[in-house]
Image: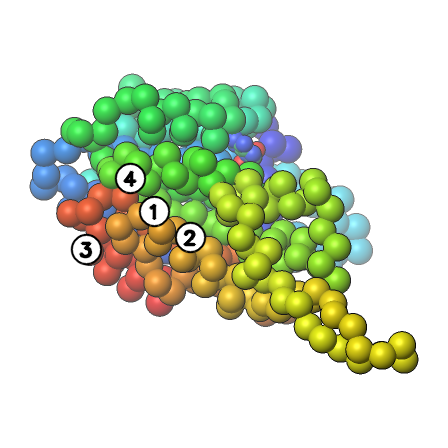
Amino acid sequence: MQNTKHNFGGQWTEEKLRRVKKYLVAYATIMNKQQFRFAFIDAFAETGYRILPDEQNGSQLAMPELLEDDTRTFVEGSAKIALDVRPRFSNYIFIERDAKKIVELEKLRNSYPELSKDVFIVNKDANEWLQDRCRNYTWKKGRAVLFLDPYGMQVSWSTIEAIAETKAIDLWILFPLGVAVNRLLRRDAQISPAIRKRLNFIFGSPDWYQAFYQKKRKEDLFGENEATIKDCSFDSIAEYFVNRLLSIFPGVAPKPLALRNSKNIPLYLLCFAAANVKGAKTAIKIAQEILN
Ligand SMILES: C[S@@+](CC[C@H](N)C(=O)[O-])C[C@H]1O[C@@H](n2cnc3c(N)ncnc32)[C@H](O)[C@@H]1O
């Protein structure tokens, strides 16, 4: 059981979960007074727990392997956090691709007998499940908060479009700014076809290339020539992604939160978008305050 609990992330993971939790409490409180059924969908659910990073667990010991599993600190992951929110959600949907983690999610569900009949655990690819659910079911009477919390570039733009089309979902998404995107945008513009395809997959358009690269004239020993070079920053990549969201959602939090590592590098961007026109204004106000 222990080895399927994940050791991933540092302070920024706490930061991310703390803020999403605040939104879930605010959302459930508001929705509880309305007619809708409302779900929490955790599309990259993991197990409901994670192990604190090594530095907080004694890896600086001479022989850290002597540390027993049960002396390590397990902290709550997003699935468990959501199950503890009160007022409760009508349903919980936990999607996870890894079958071993599904076993842990089932144990988590069993530890909440009062909620368990409303907890649905799905062992599938999140993109596939979400696109089907968003496009082929009616969302007239249902609302949801969806958390997309991938390690890297797993969320396709087609999934984000399907979410926006429901006009019913409030989306929290972790955008892999520094862990992946900025690293793949090579300075010399020599981006392989496979990487271009992946960037198109997450941005839903090839125009990131015009946004992030410029032709510049430069002089060298052989005279003047033209070269294509990277011309973007963490901030401009973030702005580009926020604008992409704005092109399909009625509301997007204008200032996402950069989650930084101990060297102050922004690893991820925590973003929020609201798909429901009526609810967007309030949702964005609450989400932006939480992000600030
Ligand atoms: C960063 S972890 C999620 C952490 C979790 N939200 C928490 O706070 O406890 C990402 C999870 O997504 C799962 N995953 C990766 N690709 C996936 C996919 N395409 N569909 C569903 N799950 C996926 C991984 O197995 C991993 O458990």
Q: Is residue 134 visible?
A: yes
Instruction: Assess whether mark 2 and mark 1 are in contact (beta carbons under 8 angstroms).
Output: yes
Spatial CA span between label 4 and label 1:
13 Å
Relative to 136, is 5 above or below? below
Amino acid, disc 2: Arg
Mark before the other along the chain sequence, 4 or 2: 4
Instruction: Assess whether mark 2 and mark 4 are in contact (beta carbons under 8 angstroms).
Output: no
Beta carbon at label 3 within 8 Å of ligand 1: no
**Residue at the spot x=23%, y=24% of the render?**
138
Tag 1 residue: 248
Quarter of the C terminus within the rendering: bottom left
Quarter of the N terminus within the rendering: top right
Q: Nearer the viewer, mark 3 or mark 1?
A: 1
Q: Residues within 10 Å of mark 3 (few under 14, many from 20)?
A: few
Horizontally, residue 63 falls left or right of residue 80, namely right
Amino acid, disc 3: Thr
Mark before the other along the chain sequence, 4 or 3: 4
Horizontally, residue 192 falls left or right of residue 36, namely right
Amino acid, disc 4: Ile
